[in-house]
Amino acid sequence: MENIVNVTLANGSAADIDRLIADRRQVTTSSSCGVCGRRTIESLAAYAAPVHARWTIPASAITSLPARLRTRQLVFDDTGGLHAAGLFARGGTLVDAAEDVGRHNAVDKIVGRMLMRDELPLGDFLLFVSGRTSFEIVQKAIYAGIPIVAAVSAPSTLAIELAEAYGVTLVGFVRGEAFNIYAHPERIAADSGTSDGE
């Protein structure tokens, strides 16, 4: 199997483990980006600019996102226990997908890949996540320049406020043929075609 490391202690080192642990400084660490976890929208002002994108996407493309992302959730097929994030082009084409135990990590994987390809900002894409939308996920979208964030579940109140303040279209409860729009509805078109705007 992949991603497994077997460690065998040798030369009596097993007896030293308690001593080594006792001498260590106990510190709580986080795998967050450093600005994730801020508690107010105002605290982001020095780090991010509002997202500006004038293109639209048809409502039918939004409702197709869960099924399109689901086709790329191969580990979920085996475990039933992973979140997923998908990066979609304007017309709804799935460009990249990632799975992880944490939905934040799945988003990080996608944004990280695009950063490594020197393709940021992502103003021509939308982000779809398989869980709820928290403040941190909207925050990551803002830093990446993603104008639309959608999810199968609900956004938090702070996520809605952040999306509204920073120009992100926030969509939740994308299930079947329905969804809710919580911020900047102007990017979701009722017709069947996309519009690039100016």
Image: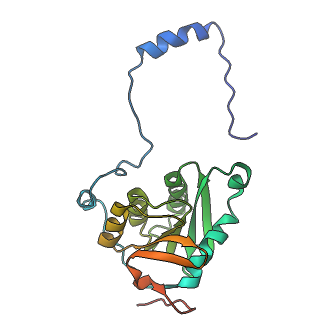
Q: Is residue 82 above or below residue 27?
A: below
In the displayed structure image, the side of residue 134 where residue 101 appears, left or right: right
Question: In the image, what residue occupies the spot 65% across and 15% down?
Answer: 9
Q: Is residue 12 above or below residue 131?
A: above
Residue 158 appears in which quarter of the rendering?
A: bottom left
Q: Nearer the viewer, residue 21 or 117?
A: 21
Would you say residue 125 is visible in this rendering?
A: yes
In the displayed structure image, the side of residue 34 where residue 8 appears, left or right: right
User: What is the count of numbered marks?
Assistant: 0
Q: How far from the left and from the top, in percent, is residue 126? A: 51, 72
Q: Nearer the viewer, residue 101 or 113?
A: 101
Instruction: Look at the image and tell me in which quarter the N terminus lies.
Output: top right
Q: How far from the left and from the top, in percent, is residue 25? A: 38, 21
Question: In the image, what residue occupies the spot 38% across and 28% down?
Answer: 27
Instruction: Look at the image and tell me in which quarter the C terminus lies.
Output: bottom left
Q: How far from the left and from the top, in percent, is residue 128? A: 54, 67
Q: Nearer the viewer, residue 175 or 55?
A: 175
Would you say residue 124 is visible in this rendering?
A: no
Question: In the image, what residue occupies the spot 54% across and 80% down?
Answer: 90
Tell me which colouring the rendered structure shows: rainbow
Q: Nearer the viewer, residue 151 or 26?
A: 151
Q: How far from the left and from the top, in percent, is residue 59? A: 54, 84
Residue 62 appears in which quarter of the rendering?
A: bottom right
